Image: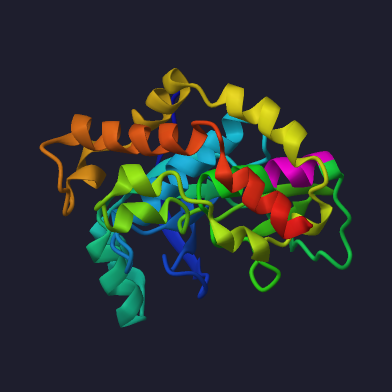
Amino acid sequence: MNLRTVRATRYVTPLREGGSLPAIVEADDDGLYVLKFRGAGQGPKALIAELVAGELARALDLPVPEIVFVELDAELARTEPDPEIQDLIRASAGLNLALDFLPGSITFDPLVEKLDGALASRVVWFDALVTNVDRTPRNTNMLIWHKRLWLIDHGAALYFHHAWDDYRARSRGRFPQIREHVLLPAADRLEEADADLSRRVTPPLVEEILGLVPDEWLAAGSPFAGPAEHRAAYAEYLAGRLAPPRDFVQEAADARA
């Protein structure tokens, strides 16, 4: 498993939403990407969550735009008239993360789009696993592109890593925020989704995905001795989430009832 690395060549336009202050940038492969800045308020942790959750979703055959590493040169700030954008680019010089830009996509509207119960259940199960608080009717973080659903913006997932105390015990939490999930009313096959997806999130898969996280992102404010120990803690947390009985699945079922 590998991610491509591209180099940002042009800052196109800001997307003034979300804690990571994303922007559309053009890269040296002539593609357009939604760039998540390492120097934004939540720092590298938002990028780690985006990478780990996004690639885990992809491994489970959920639709996520391509994720790439983006090399950002501080010199790009010189062409921007907005001082806030200049500061953000300079603070993010180096390796960042981005998702493929989906031109012409529209925000998922639960009143218009009706999803198959199987897909809705898989998305709900996945978001409960990674504790993604950002898939509500107010902010669905889903797009419709070419008549297909796409999942975006997982930077708020895995929020346990903002404070590592008792992370093993916290991995067993039920995740009550699933009650606000925009797809919960349609998720009528949670038991089926749990049986399939839980067996597919294997320790080797988790290890492979965590291996994609750059050491430098793990170093910032880390309470661990080194990157290997830090990755092992993420793996422990996800293993705890997956260990039966998975209370987060029962929490979702109870919320539907």
Residue 107 percent across, percent down from the top left: 73, 64
Left or right of 203? Residue 186 is right
Q: Nearer the viewer, residue 53 or 36?
A: 53
At x 24%, y 59%, the residue is 74
Left or right of 197? Residue 112 is right
Q: Can you say whether 9 is above or below 182 in the image?
A: above
Residue 237 percent across, percent down from the top left: 37, 39
Residue 14 percent across, percent down from the top left: 49, 71
Residue 105 seen in the figure: no
Q: Can you say whether 224 is above or below 86 in the image?
A: above
The kind of secondary structure the magenta stretch mainly shows is: helix
Residue 257 seen in the figure: yes
Magenta-drawn stretch contains 251? no
Report the span colored magenta: 118-123
At x 56%, y 35%, the residue is 245
Residue 161 percent across, percent down from the top left: 32, 52
